[in-house]
Image: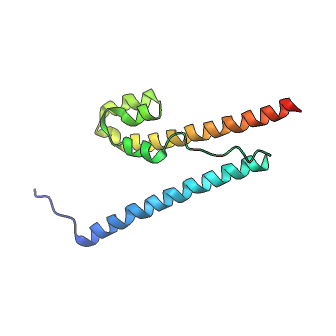
């Protein structure tokens, strides 16, 4: 059995897909940031801004590396342990690390917003 080289048209489609997916991901991230900032402003705290504690893109990229590097990045020991099953872990680890990074960022935003609301209610 011989390996066939991908055709030029297939390579162009692949080359187009990566920037398109990246742009789509950036758009989604920007929308989430805007929605979170709008929510904080509606609650009377426009100073509380959505900030990325962890980079979801970096978490996704690290998910392809062996030894559970992404799991350590997102501080999830279960993900890190599953990275020992590399290369099979590349099937689930990048996506799970991406979602974990978004969750960490969301929790940090919610914590800052709740702290601001609590501080406001205590000062009244």
In this figure, what is the number of numbered marks?
Answer: 0
Whether residue 42 sits left or right of residue 91 in the image: it is right
**Farthest residue in the right direction?**
124
Q: Answer whether residue 92 is visible to the viewer in this image.
A: no
Which residue sits at x=61%, y=56%? 31
* Whole-percent x, y for residue 68 in the image: 36, 33
Report x, y in % for residue 27. 54, 59
Quadrant of the rendered image containing residue 67: top left
Residue sitting at 50 percent across and 38 percent down? Answer: 100
108 left or right, relative to 57: right
User: What percent of the width, then of the height, locates residue 74?
Assistant: 47, 35
Q: Residue drawn 33% across and 68% down? A: 13
Image height of 43 relative to 116, above or below: below
**Horizontal placement of 79 versus 113: left or right?**
left
Residue 116 appears at what percent x and percent y? 75, 36
The residue lying toward the viewer, choosing from 108 and 76, is 108
**98 in relation to 114, above or below:** below
Q: Quadrant of residue 30?
A: bottom right
Residue 43 showing in the rendered view: yes
Image quarter (top left, top right, bottom left or bottom right) of the C terminus = top right
Q: Colour scheme of this structure image?
A: rainbow
Residue 70 position (above or below residue 25): above
The N terminus lies in which quarter of the figure?
bottom left
Position of 54 relative to 31 (above/below): above
Q: Nearer the viewer, residue 1 or 47?
A: 47
Residue lying furthest bottom in this view? 9
Residue that appears at 17% across and 63% down: 5
């Amino acid at each position: 059995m011989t390996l066939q080289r991908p055709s030029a048209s297939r390579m162009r489609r692949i080359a187009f897909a990566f920037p398109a997916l990246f742009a789509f991901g950036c758009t989604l991230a920007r929308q989430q940031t805007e929605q979170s900032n709008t929510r904080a402003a509606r609650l009377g705290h426009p100073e509380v801004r959505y900030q990325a504690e962890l980079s979801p893109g970096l978490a996704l990229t690290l998910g392809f590396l062996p030894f559970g590097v992404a799991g350590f990045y997102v501080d999830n020991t279960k993900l890190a342990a599953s990275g020992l099953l590399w290369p099979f872990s590349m099937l689930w680890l990048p996506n799970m690390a991406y979602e974990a990074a978004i969750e960490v960022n969301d929790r940090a935003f919610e914590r800052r917003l709740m702290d601001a609301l609590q501080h406001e209610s205590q000062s009244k």
